[in-house]
Image: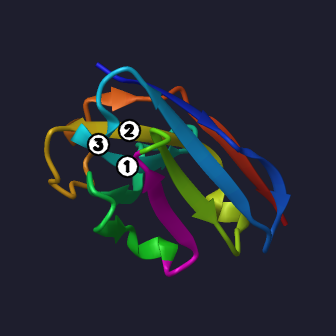
Amino acid sequence: QVQLVESGGGLVQAGGSLRLSCAASSGTFSNYAMGWFRQTPGKEREFVATISRSGGIMRYANFVKGRFTISRDNAKNTVYLQLNSLKPEDTAVYYCAAERNTDSYSVRPSSFDYWGQGTQVTVSS
């Protein structure tokens, strides 16, 4: 089992940037594909990006359009999400998630086994 803790959220103006981090404890981090999702009140959790266990393959939601970058450092047990050119519609709670022992590149929240508590990102216009 792995515990996930996100950090790096905050308030930023439109066009600004943030870097989210998700630190994993316990378990072998490199055994988990990692993903980022986001959620706003009253809406379902939405796929943002995923990265393979080795970090070699990434997949993004269409709305990202080159603005966000997912990366990981297996030596530091951490996955990152760099958010650039932020828009007010990017405002949400961002969650990281871990998928055990596979690189399915799934966009479905149900494919992921472990979740962090989330970090709030607020983009002002």
- Would you call the spot at circle 3 few (<14 residues within 10 Å), some (14-19), or many (20 or more)? some
Please say which color scheme the image uses. rainbow
State the separation of the CA atoms marked 1 and 2: 5 Å
Apparent side of residue 84 relative to residue 42 in the rendered image (left or right): right
State the separation of the CA atoms marked 2 and 3: 13 Å
| Amino acid under disc 2 | Ala
Q: Are marks 1 and 3 in contact (CB under 8 Å)?
A: no
Apparent side of residue 58 relative to residue 68 in the rendered image (left or right): left
- Dot 1 falls on a residue whose secondary structure is strand
User: Residue at position x 46%, y 60% from top?
Assistant: 71
- Residue receiving disc 2: 97
User: Residue at position x 33%, y 28% from top?
Assistant: 114
- Residue interval drawn in magenta: 65-74
Looking at this rendering, what residue extends furthest in the front direction?
75
Q: Are marks 2 and 3 in contact (CB under 8 Å)?
A: no
The quadrant where residue 19 appears? bottom right
- Residue receiving disc 1: 35
| Residue 81 position (above or below residue 39) | below
| Amino acid under disc 3 | Ser
